[in-house]
Amino acid sequence: MYQIGAIVKPQKLNELTEGLNEIGIVGMTAMEVNGYGRQKGVTEMYRGSEYKVRFVPKVLVKIAVKNEDLEKALKTIQAKANTGNIGDGKIFVTKLDQVIRIRTGETGDIAI
């Protein structure tokens, strides 16, 4: 099992959610976050003055997937979150040792 953390542009969240649902991944957590990467923020104009916004709003999506679903989940995230512009985000993959469904006590793949 794996946990995928994807940092994406907020406007891509609905498209990403629909794409993951289409391939059978229905559970996710989404958090509004702020950050910057290589782009080091953006320069904005306000009332004729330029100012630097270092932390850019993003969405962090976390999903847990079975081993056999990892590649199709990664391909879907990459396809749905891609705009071709700087700041499209990153995907992080972490191995999960165990998952437990609190309500039933089920563990492993069945708990996903």
Image: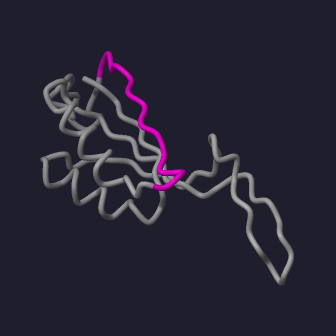
Q: Residue at x 28, y 50 (%)?
A: 79
Is residue 29 found left or right of 102 in the rendered image? right
Magenta residues? Answer: 85-98
Q: Quadrant of the N terminus?
A: top left
Q: Quadrant of residue 66?
A: top left
Expressed as whole percent of the image width and height from the top left, the position of residue 51 reads: 83, 65
Q: Could you tell me residue 44's position as x and y percent?
A: 74, 69
Is residue 84 in the magenta section?
no
Q: Quadrant of residue 15?
A: bottom left
Residue 71 image point, x, y percent: 21, 32
Left or right for 109, reference 99: left
Residue closest to the eye, 82 or 105: 82
Residue positioned 33% across, 64% down in the render: 14
Task: Give the residue furthest to the front.
Answer: 84
Instruction: Place residue 56 in its image quadrant.
Output: bottom right
Q: Is residue 6 left or right of residue 51?
A: left
Q: Is residue 100 above or below residue 59?
A: above
Q: Residue at x 34, y 30 (%)?
A: 3
Relative to 86, residue 49 above or below? below
- Whole-percent x and y of residue 74? 28, 37
Q: Is residue 59 left or right of residue 61?
A: right
Residue located farthest toward the top when viewing the structure as drawn:
97
Q: Nearer the viewer, residue 32 or 36?
A: 36
